[in-house]
Image (cartoon, helix red, strand yellow):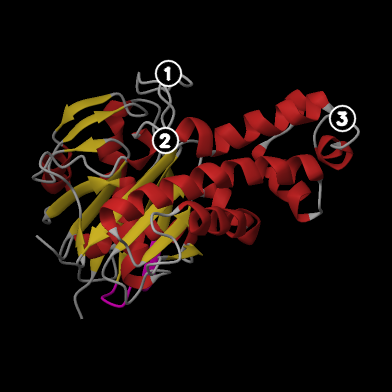
């Protein structure tokens, strides 16, 4: 059975695993991401060499945040690593002496979920990763949609509100300014400041002030019925539902997968997002609509997806 290594390269950690053809992780390691971006390649190689010691592996797949070239070789731009036209494939291949492919981190997570997780058995899948920002991946007819230049499916950066909030990409009104974990925290802090009596439980989880509210507090409070936390989720869900409706008009997927840290709230987010999607989807009531589900692989999706994509060289 062919084994490959998948590596999920994050701003704080580098996670690697040996993965079989069934998507099972047989060996894994997690290392701290060096602060010096020039040392990241050596740490990636260390992680790969550590997990492969007891296994015969054929290739390595790397999931990196940023824009990846069409030939899956170069990270054109990665803000958290300060990479510009970084020849990551060749650097790692020289260090580990194995074939290497590079892919965007949201794409590899989407591929992992589509192949072995919540989208298994469906050929047309859209995954929205809802964390600090909004990322995503699109699988059409069983193939990852990468675009002409390799940097397609940046789902968090399509404009939903012309002239809206300033985004880190330089545009105004991107989806991630309204449907991300950052947006949820902003909304809930504002709600708690307006009506602290309604947010008593939420405030008690932090330092008693709106400024002390963290994302983890919001999910906990929502599970206990805190009205301000639930209102925040409901507003974010409206934007997600509208985004899914717009993507349905273009892509007609069979399933939407909600992943990322915010999706850990489960049906607290998925249920209102699904409801709004069913309300605003084009020709609703006259056509079949995609399922809306939450991701099942958790943080392993990146490792599993990157390893599986390494088989497609």
Q: CA distance from mark 1 to mark 2?
A: 30 Å
- Return the x and y of residue 185 as percentages of the image width and height: 64, 33
Q: Quadrant of residue 301?
A: bottom left
What kind of element bears circle 2? Answer: loop
In the picture of the structure, the residue carrying the numbered disc 2 is 11
Q: Is residue 26 magenta?
A: yes
- The residues colored magenta run 20-28
Looking at the image, is mark 2 or mark 3 nearer the viewer? 3
In the picture of the structure, the residue carrying the numbered disc 1 is 163
For this rendering, which residue is in front, 301 or 218? 218
In the picture of the structure, the residue carrying the numbered disc 3 is 196
Q: Is residue 178 visible?
A: yes
- Return the x and y of residue 255 as percentages of the image width and height: 39, 65
Residue 84 numbered mark, or none: none
Q: Is residue 273 magenta?
A: no
In this rendering, would 69 be left or right of 23?
Answer: left
Q: Earlier in the sequence, mark 3 or mark 1?
A: 1
Mark 1 Cα-neighbour bin, 10 Å: few <14, some 14–19, many ≥20? few
In this rendering, would 185 be left or right of 151?
Answer: right
In this rendering, would 293 be left or right of 78?
Answer: right
Q: Residue at 65% across / 45% down in the picture?
A: 233
């Amino acid at each position: 059975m062919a084994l490959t290594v998948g590596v999920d390269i994050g701003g704080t950690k580098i996670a690697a695993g040996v993965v079989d053809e069934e998507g099972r992780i047989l060996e894994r390691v997690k290392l701290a991401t060096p602060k010096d971006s020039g040392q990241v390649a050596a740490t990636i190689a260390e992680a790969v060499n550590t997990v492969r010691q007891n296994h015969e592996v054929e290739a390595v797949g790397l999931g990196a945040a940023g824009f990846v070239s069409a030939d899956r070789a170069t990270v054109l731009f990665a803000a958290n690593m300060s990479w510009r036209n970084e020849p990551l494939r060749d650097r790692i291949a020289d260090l580990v002496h194995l074939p290497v492919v590079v892919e965007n981190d949201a794409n590899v997570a989407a591929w992992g979920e589509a192949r072995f997780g919540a989208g298994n058995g469906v050929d047309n899948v859209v995954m929205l990763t809802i964390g600090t920002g909004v990322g995503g991946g699109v699988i059409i007819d069983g193939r990852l949609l990468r675009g002409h230049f390799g940097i397609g499916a940046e789902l968090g950066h399509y404009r939903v509100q012309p002239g809206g909030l300033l985004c880190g990409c330089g545009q105004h009104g991107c989806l991630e300014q309204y449907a991300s974990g950052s947006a949820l925290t902003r909304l809930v802090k504002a709600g708690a400041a307006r009506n602290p009596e309604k947010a008593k439980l939420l405030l008690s989880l932090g330092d008693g002030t709106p400024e002390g509210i963290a994302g983890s507090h919001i999910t906990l409070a929502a599970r206990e019925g805190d009205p301000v936390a639930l209102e925040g989720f409901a507003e974010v869900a409206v934007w997600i539902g509208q985004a899914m409706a717009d993507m349905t008009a273009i892509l007609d997927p069979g399933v939407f997968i909600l992943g990322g840290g915010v999706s850990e709230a489960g049906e607290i987010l998925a249920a209102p997002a699904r409801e709004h999607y069913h309300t605003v989807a084009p020709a609703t009531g006259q056509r079949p609509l995609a399922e809306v589900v939450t991701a099942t692989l958790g943080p392993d999706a990146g490792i599993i997806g990157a390893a599986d994509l390494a088989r497609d060289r």
